[in-house]
Amino acid sequence: MRHLMIPLIFLFLASCGWHLPQGNTSGLIKKEDSFADPAKISQLKLTNALQYHQTLERLDPVDLASLGAARTLISNCVSDSLTRDSMFVDFNGFLNNLAASYLENNETVANQLVNSPSSETVNTLKTSFAANGLLLYSQEGLFSLEPQTKFLLQQFGKDLSGPYREFLSIRCREQEFGFEKVGKLLIPADSLASRILNWENFIQRNPGFISIRIAKENYAHYLSLFLAGADNSRAFDPETNHLNDSLKVTFESFVAKNPESSSGQLVKAYLEMLKSNDFIYCDKVDSFLLEKVYH
């Protein structure tokens, strides 16, 4: 029976109005292609991640209605939480791609956001996007969309494995408070330290986590910001190239409080390397980050 499911899905998709245009033998869906009806797609009950991946490819990648169908498919999945974890990875990719391309591909919405839109217009759009798990941001007059982790946790938490719920919970807290804007850190160094330890502990507890690569990237990013700062919040004085005195104290405190952690040992090695050069920035800093943080 399992071997019949995928062909049956494609028969269902055909009944939704989806088809490949005449002459298209590559299997690639282009902008002018037809897509399946999201309302009918959401009626499917899938049993594995491959079916879900193939079904997502039949949904319009720049239509908010596609997100609703994609969410419903996971909720209706008649399999275990690990299978739904795999489906969620695909959903998350679909959501991120839509967020990155939606404003560019939706002329009506894009036109509403040009030439200093009214706060009423922006708030209306924010409400509409929020209902689909997207946050509308404005920075220096430019608008962008970003997935809202709190929405994802509320929508999918009960369907996912324990590690994935923990992963989303960590991301949810981080997104709520933010941390960086235009190359400037918005949180103090001790808050960065807490995020570093949160990710280190998560990685150690869940080495087989399906999205472990992303967890490691988060850990490395926060660690690099902690050690070297951001473009407009440098760890080293721009004039003297000397390590910020208060940050030196923070590093020493971090090492003292977390002597057995991998992060504590790494920061200790960083301090020793800096001490050998009187805490002045040098090429060894970049080499250390490349070797120890971004390895």
Image: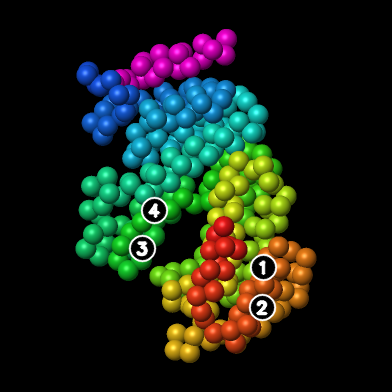
- Mark 1 highlights which residue? 266
Q: Nearer the viewer, residue 94 or 278?
A: 278
Span of residues in magenta: 1-20
First reached walking from the N terminus: tag 3 or tag 4: 3
Q: Residues within 10 Å of mark 3 (few under 14, many from 20)?
A: few
Residue 43 lies, in percent from the top left, at 48, 23
Observer-side mark, 4 or 2, equals 2
Tag 4 secondary structure: strand
Residue 202 lies, in percent from the top left, at 68, 53
Tag 3 secondary structure: strand
Instruction: Tell me how far mark 4 sits from mark 2, CA to CA.
Output: 42 Å
Instruction: Tell me how far mark 3 sits from mark 2, CA to CA.
Output: 42 Å
Residue 197 in the magenta stretch? The answer is no
The chief SS type of the magenta part is: helix
Q: Residues within 10 Å of mark 1 (few under 14, many from 20)?
A: some
Observer-side mark, 1 or 2, equals 2
First reached walking from the N terminus: tag 1 or tag 3: 3
Q: Is residue 98 visible?
A: yes
Q: Is residue 5 left or right of residue 272?
A: left
Kind of residue at badge 4: Leu
Task: Tell me whether circle 1 and circle 2 mark residues in contact (CB < 8 Å).
Answer: no
Rendered view: 67 above or below 189: above
Mark sitting on residue 145: 4
Observer-side mark, 3 or 2, equals 2
Kind of residue at badge 2: Glu
Q: Which residue is found at the position 64% from the left and 33% from the top?
A: 82
First reached walking from the N terminus: tag 4 or tag 1: 4
First reached walking from the N terminus: tag 3 or tag 2: 3
The quadrant in which the N terminus is found is top right
